[in-house]
Amino acid sequence: MTRPCVMIAATGSGRGKTAVTCAILRALSERGLTARAFKAGPDYIDPMFHRAALGIPSKNLDLFFTDAPTVNALFEEGNDAEISIVEGVMGLYDGLEPDSDAASSYRLACALDAPVVLVADARGMSRSLIAEIRGFLDYDAEKRIKGVILNNVSEAFYQTVAPIIERELGVAALGSFPNLGELAFESRYLGLRLPGEIDGLRAKLGEAARVAEKTLQIDRLLELARERADFAPPSPAPSLPDPIARVAIAQDAAFCFYYEDNLRMLRAAGLELVPFSPLRNEPVPADASGLILGGGYPELFAAELARADAAKESIRQALNSGLPTLAECGGFMWLHEKIVTREGEEFPAVGALPGVCRYAGKLVRFGYVTLQEKTPRFLTGASRSIRGHEFHYYDVDADGADCEAVKPSGKRWPCAHVDAGRWLGFAHLYYPSNPDFVRAFADACAIAKRRVSER
C-alpha cells in the first residue's frame, strides 16, 4: 500500500459495517477530503451505497478472483485519494472454507498492508464484548487490528467500556454508533435493498455523517490510515483508445449488477458502452455491435418486463442474428421463455433461450467458481478459464453445458451457453481474472461491426 488506507471490517455479517462505512465516507466527503471506496469480495450492492455516499464509483477487491499483486494494482490504479476506505465482507476471518482464512477480509488487509478497524455489534452484551474482541485479536497474526467501533450501543455504555477495551486489549476505541433506527438499510434475500429503492437516502446519509462526526473519532481513524502511507503518486489511469465498436448494456433497476473494473476493461478494449433500459421498453440500439445483460432483479420487475415488447423483440432478434452477447444471472434468467416468481405468477420473458426460470425456494448455487470451457470457443488463448461467483434463488430448465463450474471445494457441474461470441450463464464473471475474456468479446464485436458495414 502506498497511500492512506483503512479497512472497516466486522465480527460477522449483519453487524452494520456498511452503514458505518457509508457514514464515514459521507463524513469524509463533507470535510472536503478526497476519498475512495472499495469492497472486499464479490458483492455488488454495497459498492452502490459507497457510490451514493461519495458520488463516484466504488471498486471490488477479491483474492479469489485475482492474486495479491493484481489486487494492489487495481487498488492503486488512478487512486489519488487522501484516504481510501475498504469495507470488509462477512466476518474478518471468513474465507473460502471454515478451515482457512484464504480470500478473507483479513488476507486482503494483509495484501494491502492496511490497518483494520473492527466493527463489533455490542447489542445484548456487556463483559462478553471484551471476550469477543479478544478472540479476534488472538487470531490476528500480523497485528492488523488497530481499533474497534461499537455498533448498536448507547453513549453511556460506550464511555464505560471504551477505557476497558484500550486498557485490557491494547487497541484504540474509535467510538460508537447508536441504534441505527431510520439510518438502517433494509435487506432482501439477495442482500441490501438497492439505493434507489430507499426513500430519502441522501438525507439519511447526511444524518449518518453527522452522527459519525459526533460519536466516532474520525481524526484518529485518519491517523491510523496514514501510518503506513508513503504518499507515492498514483499510477495513472490509461487513456481510452478510439472506439472499435458500440455495445448496448442494460442498465436500470432490473439489470444493475456490474463490477466497475469490468466496465473499465471493456472501455479500455475499445468498446463504447451505450446504456439502454429494458425496464423502460427501450430496444437494443440499432448500431450496437454487441450486447451485455448484467445481473440484477428481473424477477421483481417481471410484470413490467413482460410488457416491454420492443425491448424483448430487439434482444431476441439480436441473439438470433448472432450478435456477440454477454448475459449473466438476472440477464441470463430473462432470456428464457418465462419467469415464474416466488409467488407462483408466470410472466413471459425474452424467449431467446428455451425453458422456464423458476423460484427454487432456496439458494440454488452459492459461492466462488472457476469456469472452464469444455471446448475452446470463446476463450481460445492460453488461459481457458475465468473466475466468478454464483448467488441465486432461481433456476432454469437448461443451465447450459459448454463450461464446467468448479468450486474451491472441488464440486463441479456443467453450465453456460458459450460460442465464439456469446457467453450466457448464471455466474457473475470478474474480468480481471482473465483479460483474454475481454479481448475475445471485443474482437467478436469488431468482427460483427465489420460484417454490418460490408453488407
Image (cartoon, grey):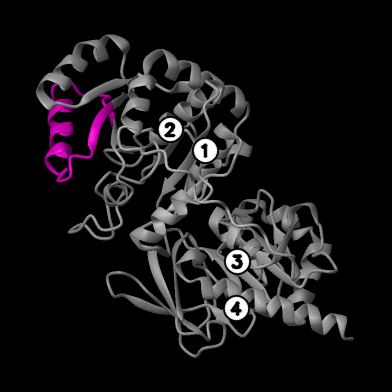
Q: What's under tag 2, amino acid-wise?
A: Thr
The answer to if 251 sits in the magenta stretch is: no
Q: CA distance from mark 4 to mark 2?
A: 37 Å
Q: How far from the left and from the top, in percent, is residue 88?
A: 36, 43
Q: What's under tag 1, amino acid-wise?
A: His
Residue interval drawn in magenta: 120-148
If you read the primary sequence from the N terminus, does the residue marked by circle 1 or circle 2 appear first?
Answer: 2
If you read the primary sequence from the N terminus, does the residue marked by circle 4 or circle 3 appear first?
Answer: 3
Per the image, label 3 sits on a secondary structure element best described as: helix
Pointers 1 and 3 in contact (C-beta within 8 Å):
no
Per the image, label 2 sits on a secondary structure element best described as: helix
Q: How far from the left and from the top, in percent, is residue 178?
A: 37, 18
Question: Counting other residues with Cα less than 10 Å from the Cα at mark 2, is it few (<14), some (14-19), or many (20 or more)?
Answer: many
Q: Is 321 drawn above or below residue 409 in the view shown? A: below
Pointers 4 and 1 in contact (C-beta within 8 Å):
no
Name the image quarter holding residue 213.
top left
| Mark identifier at residue 440 | 4
Name the image quarter holding residue 138.
top left
Can see residue 217?
yes
If you read the primary sequence from the N terminus, does the residue marked by circle 3 or circle 2 appear first?
Answer: 2
Compared across the picture, whether 29 is left or right of 249 comes to: left
Per the image, label 1 sits on a secondary structure element best described as: helix
Q: Nearer the viewer, mark 3 or mark 2?
A: 2
Q: Is 313 drawn above or below residue 257 in the view shown? A: below
If you read the primary sequence from the N terminus, does the residue marked by circle 4 or circle 1 appear first?
Answer: 1
Q: Which residue is mark 3?
A: 333
Pointers 4 and 2 in contact (C-beta within 8 Å):
no
Q: Which residue is mark 1?
A: 50
Q: CA distance from mark 4 to mark 3?
A: 23 Å
